[in-house]
Amino acid sequence: WTYAHHAIRTDFVDTLQAIDRMLNATSVAEWEYEALKKWWTQVEAFLHAHHDHEEELFFPKIKERVVLPERLTTDHKTLVEGLDAATEAVKKASDVASLREAQALVRSVEELLLPHLKEEEDDTLPLMMKHFTQKEIE
């Protein structure tokens, strides 16, 4: 679980660094915009898959033994809405103005996402480890 979270954090750092480099460049070639779009498509797909796995596999099982805060699921809905908006902005990025919009939306998702990941690691993961055997987790 934490490996996926670390990968997600790294993906956001890498995405924002790429956008920063593009914004600070004297010129940006079309292939760079296309590379950003392809990269973000993978980031988005991984994050959607991760949330789906939590909602469909992890959370229902954990809820059989432990009460989880409803905000974990609510956070996912909010994050998906923000992720979808960021994705649309990244897809439209073709100049400095649209790239700045994409940057702002990616940052806003990251600002919501980081505390959510930390909460899952600090609260939900220990509950799972406490109430499930290693064999059940595997």
Image: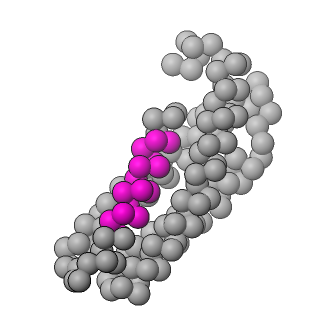
Say whether residue 74 is left or right of residue 104.
right
The majority secondary structure of the magenta stretch comes to helix
Q: Tell me the quarter of the picture where residue 109 sits.
A: bottom right
Find the residue positioned furthest to the right.
67
Seen at 59% across and 40% down, the residue is 54
Residue 105 vertical placement versus 96 (above, below): above
- Residue 66, image x and y in percent? 77, 28
Seen at 67% across and 42% down, the residue is 119
Residue 136 magenta-highlighted = no
Residue 18 magenta-highlighted = yes
The color scheme shown is one colour
Seen at 45% across and 75% down, the residue is 102
Seen at 26% across and 78% down, the residue is 25
41 and 109: which is toward the camera: 109
Q: Magenta region: which residues?
A: 5-19
Say whether residue 24 is left or right of residue 74.
left
- Residue 33, image x and y in percent? 27, 74
- Residue 84, image x and y in percent? 52, 67
Residue 63 in view in this figure: yes
